[in-house]
Image: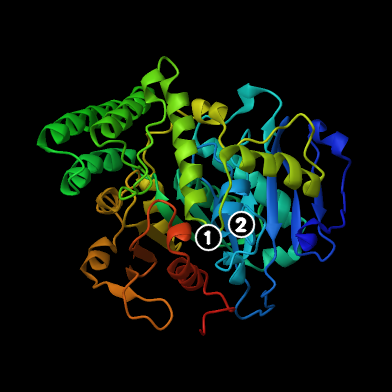
């Protein structure tokens, strides 16, 4: 705790200049942490937090990797959720996390898109409306961070995403590659990793009914109702009625929860059957649904921690009190929240759009694409992920599908914790026993996976 609070600020520009659209950054005395604001557009500031690994090795032949973590939502805070609840160096009780990915790479967390977490806009009209606009902002963020730090330019950047963050990841990777080719961004894209990612909403909603029926969570009558609603969503997507599809998606989730006694969309074997307040959903049903979902999201992550405690209010207080005091650059009028309803509302027209084409483009460009999925996830079920993979037009798909899977183990145990297979630059990991939040449910195998993805010099020989 003492080490966490001990720091020496190196302010580049005064806090009062933030609203003037200028960059501001700070770092700890030992230089292992940096954070700041990047002006991605006039009156739009994105917050970032970079941790440098204590295991960092300077080796020109095998450069040290950097992982950029992109949270989902859209509008969920990566600086809080991904950092303190999943893969960062400290958990929500500010205790060291034994399974932190910082062991094998530097970690860069962002509150993305603007309006999320500590990131902000001075006019809600500046909130992004789609994934491409979010990618453009993220590209400007990377330009801001990497341009002023030549040491970071030597490290390959791995864009790792969770949930809706997968759509951000593939659009960012293409935007970054374009900027690199134009000479406006100096970095190397090492690869993209899509964890339980919302790449094809159509395939996921179509997977829910069959999966839940196979698990005895729906019967034949329930399945027919659910499948009929999923087919309606499929048609709305095909007709380009994306906002209608978003509302229908919300209705489908509610019907599934009611008919399954409130299955947990993040782990369909979870015993938590708390129903929330879906009966009160009215005209603002999408907004309320996301709020309920985020409560479950946060509650699920808290329940998986090895240390007790941590209500939603306590987590919010952590960010608005202890973390704010540590960072010292957060404007007084910016109050942290785990999920921005405004961000989700602004993006609801893009929410149900697929990004399979972008994955194809990355594969065609030779970018390493890793897909990993938790066995027990429902919202981004493995069944749905496998369905959208089959839609890829990549020339190596048939060879990939013909490959045999390899079992994955942790330590000396010989019980399989997952399976993987690869062909050229496409890699897939099936993570057994994990729900939507794979690093939380299966930290050992996930850390091993990230070591392989990044080819990290730290633990690759272990």
Q: Horizontal placement of 356 versus 97: left or right?
A: left
> Can I make out residue 182 in this image?
no
How far is the residue under mark 2 from the one under mark 1? 10 Å
- Marks 2 and 1 close (CB-CB < 8 Å): yes
Q: Residues within 10 Å of mark 1 (few under 14, many from 20)?
A: few
Q: Quadrant of residue 318?
A: top right
- Which mark sits nearer the N-terminus, 2 or 1? 2
Residue 92 in the image: state x and y as whole percent.
62, 52
Q: Where does label 1 land, which residue?
A: 306
Above or below, 201 against 372 in this view is above
Q: Horizontal placement of 265 versus 108: left or right?
A: left
> Can I make out residue 439 in this image?
yes
Front residue of 359/371: it is 371
Q: Where does label 2 land, which residue?
A: 91
Residue 9 in the image: state x and y as whole percent.
87, 53
Residue 155 in the image: state x and y as whole percent.
64, 67
Q: Residue visible at 82% across and 52% down?
A: 26
Q: Quadrant of residue 201?
A: top left
Q: Residues within 10 Å of mark 2 (few under 14, many from 20)?
A: many
Above or below, 453 against 355 in this view is below
Q: How many marks?
A: 2
Residue 156 in the image: state x and y as whole percent.
59, 66
Q: Secondary structure at mark 1?
A: loop
Front residue of 78/220: it is 220
Above or below, 261 against 180 in this view is above
């Amino acid at each position: 705790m003492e080490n966490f609070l001990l720091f020496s600020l190196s302010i580049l520009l005064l806090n009062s200049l933030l609203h003037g659209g200028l960059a501001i950054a700070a770092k700890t005395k030992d230089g292992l942490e940096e954070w700041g604001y990047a002006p991605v557009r006039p009156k739009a500031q994105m917050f970032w937090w970079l941790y440098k690994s204590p295991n960092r090795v300077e080796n020109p032949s095998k450069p040290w990797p950097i992982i950029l973590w992109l949270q989902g939502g859209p509008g969920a805070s990566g600086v809080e959720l991904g950092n303190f609840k999943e893969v960062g160096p400290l958990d929500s009780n500010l205790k060291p996390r034994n399974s932190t990915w910082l062991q094998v790479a530097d970690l860069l967390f962002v509150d993305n898109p603007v309006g999320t977490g500590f990131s902000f806009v001075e006019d809600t009209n500046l909130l992004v409306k789609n994934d491409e606009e979010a990618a453009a902002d993220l590209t400007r963020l990377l330009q801001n961070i990497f341009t002023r730090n030549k040491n970071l330019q030597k490290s390959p950047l791995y864009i790792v995403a969770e949930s809706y963050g997968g759509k951000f990841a593939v659009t960012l990777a293409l935007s970054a590659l374009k900027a690199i080719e134009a000479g406006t961004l100096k970095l190397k894209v090492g690869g993209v990793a899509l964890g339980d990612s919302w790449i094809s909403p159509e395939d996921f909603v179509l997977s829910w009914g069959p999966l839940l029926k196979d698990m005895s969570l729906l019967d034949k009558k329930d399945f027919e109702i659910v499948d009929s609603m999923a087919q309606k969503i499929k048609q709305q997507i095909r007709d380009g009625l994306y906002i209608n599809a978003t509302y229908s998606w919300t209705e489908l989730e509610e019907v599934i929860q009611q008919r399954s006694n409130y299955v947990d969309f993040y782990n369909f074997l979870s015993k938590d059957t708390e129903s929330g307040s879906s009966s009160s959903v009215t005209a603002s049903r999408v907004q309320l649904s996301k709020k309920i979902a985020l409560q479950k999201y946060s509650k699920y992550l808290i329940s998986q921690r090895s240390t007790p405690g941590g209500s939603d209010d306590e987590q919010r207080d952590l960010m608005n009190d202890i973390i704010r005091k540590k960072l010292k650059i957060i404007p007084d009028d910016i109050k942290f929240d785990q999920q921005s309803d405004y961000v989700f509302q602004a993006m609801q027209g893009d929410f149900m759009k697929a990004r399979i084409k972008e994955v194809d483009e990355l594969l065609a460009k030779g970018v390493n694409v890793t897909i990993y999925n938790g066995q027990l996830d429902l919202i981004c079920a493995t069944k749905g992920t496998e369905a959208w993979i089959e839609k890829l037009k990549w020339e190596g798909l048939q060879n990939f599908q013909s490959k045999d899977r390899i079992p994955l183990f942790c330590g000396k145990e010989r019980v399989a914790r997952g399976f993987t297979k690869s062909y050229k630059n496409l890699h897939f990991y099936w993570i057994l026993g994990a729900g939507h939040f794979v690093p939380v449910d299966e930290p050992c195998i996930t850390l091993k996976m990230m070591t392989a993805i990044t080819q990290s010099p730290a633990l690759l020989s272990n």
